[in-house]
Image (cartoon, rainbow, N blue to C red):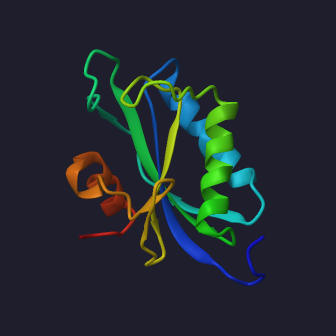
Amino acid sequence: MAASGFMAIAYISLGSNLGDRKKYCQIAIEKIKALPNIRVIKKSKLIETEPIGKTDQSKFINGVIKIQTKLKPYELLKALQKIENDLGRVRDEKWGPRTIDLDILYYDDLVVQDKELLIPHPEIKNRKFLKDALEQLGVYF
């Protein structure tokens, strides 16, 4: 468990391209809000984008939320993966369709580069929708 009083700012991306995409994103946000030790501060607008990688699939709906959390990065990752699983996320295909995809983009000024977690997220500067959503939340680079 994270140390008491420790509060980090993190940015979480969310995306969906299966079923009711906006609904899955909204449910994911509500599930994140319901987690102990997390407070959602602000959300970007949801943006429709073309699929990346495997292009023979539906368009994505993507957004970013800014949170304050007492969870450490790996605790946050596990909580987000549980939400993905609860919403039917299947991880059998790297660029395949998904009901929900949740990624930690930033966690304070922390840098983590290992097999399980990459912070800052390596694709931030390569994906215009992430830059646009982050700018809506006051993050510029």
Residue occupying image coordinates x 74% and y 55%: 35
Give the position of the N terminus as an image quadrant: bottom right
Image side of residue 11 versus residue 75, left or right: left
Residue occupying image coordinates x 74% and y 66%: 37
Q: Say if 111 sits above or below 4 in the image.
A: above
Q: Say if 132 sits above or below 141 in the image.
A: above
Using the rendered image of the protein, determine whether residue 61 is visible from the camera's viewpoint: yes
Image side of residue 14 versus residue 120, left or right: right
Q: Say if 84 sits above or below 90 in the image.
A: below
Q: Nearer the viewer, residue 111 or 106?
A: 111
Residue occupying image coordinates x 69% and y 72%: 70
Question: Residue 108: image x %, image y %?
Answer: 48, 76
Give the position of the C terminus as an image quadrant: bottom left
Residue occupying image coordinates x 65% and y 30%: 87
Using the rendered image of the protein, determine whether residue 46 is visible from the camera's viewpoint: no
Q: Where on the picture, by quarter, is residue 93?
A: top left
Question: Residue 8: image x %, image y %?
Answer: 58, 76
Question: Residue 54: image x %, image y %?
Answer: 28, 24
Task: Work out which residue is located at the far front of the displayed protein and give it.
Answer: 115
- State the count of labels: 0
Question: Residue 23: image x %, image y %?
Answer: 57, 29
